[in-house]
């Protein structure tokens, strides 16, 4: 399974469409807090049966399509360390 780093909004939108289509995704996040008072989101990680993808959240300003999936009852989201 090829891995990929997504750094643009179009690819992120395509990823979210793929997740909705397959209906199941594993999800994890990474935060950096060494130099800030509050942790800053630094990486999103997604895996479906067909894709394994990392997303740079600093490069994707609009992540609303993902948050819609998180609230969607039709898509099962497995969260690591939720």
Image: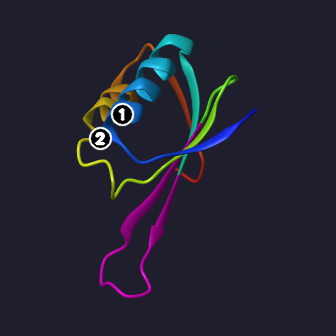
Quarter location, residue 13: top left
Is residue 59 highlighted in magenta? no
Q: Nearer the viewer, residue 8 or 58?
A: 8
Q: Residue at x 36, y 34 (%)?
A: 66
Q: Identify the mark at residue 8; answer none if there is no mark.
A: none
Q: Nearer the viewer, residue 22 or 53?
A: 53
User: Residue 65's image quarter?
Assistant: top left
Q: Is residue 35 left or right of residue 61?
A: right
Q: Residues within 10 Å of mark 1 (few under 14, many from 20)?
A: some
Vertical comparison of 63 with 20: above or below = below
Within the magenta stretch, is there residue 35? yes
Q: How far from the left and from the top, in percent, is residue 42?
A: 43, 63
Is label 2 in a helix, a strand or a loop? loop
Q: Could you give the CA–CA distance between mark 2 and mark 1, rounded to whole angstroms?
A: 6 Å
| Residue at x-position 42% and y-position 24% | 14
Q: Quadrant of residue 70?
A: top left
Q: Find out whether the residues at labels 2 and 1 contact each other: C-beta distance under 8 Å.
A: yes
Measuring 71% from the left and 36% from the top, which residue is drawn there?
2
**Residue located beneath label 2 in the image:** 63
| Residue found at x 31% / y 76% | 38
The chief SS type of the magenta part is strand
Could you say where residue 68 lies in the image, as x and y percent from the top left? 30, 28
Position of residue 1 measured from the top left corner of the image (x, y, whole percent) = 76, 32
Neighbor class of circle 2 (other Cα within 10 Å; few <14, some 14-19, many 20+) is: few
Rendered image: mark on residue 66: 1
- What span is in magenta? 29-46
Identify the element where label 1 is drawn.
Answer: helix
């Amino acid at each position: 399974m090829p891995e990929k780093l997504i750094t643009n909004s179009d690819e992120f939108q395509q990823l979210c469409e793929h997740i909705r289509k397959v209906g199941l995704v594993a999800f994890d996040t990474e935060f950096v807090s060494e130099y800030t008072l509050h942790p800053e989101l630094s990486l999103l990680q997604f895996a479906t049966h067909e894709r394994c993808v990392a997303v740079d959240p600093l490069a994707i300003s609009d992540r609303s399509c993902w948050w819609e999936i998180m609230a969607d009852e039709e898509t099962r989201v497995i969260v690591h360390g939720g």
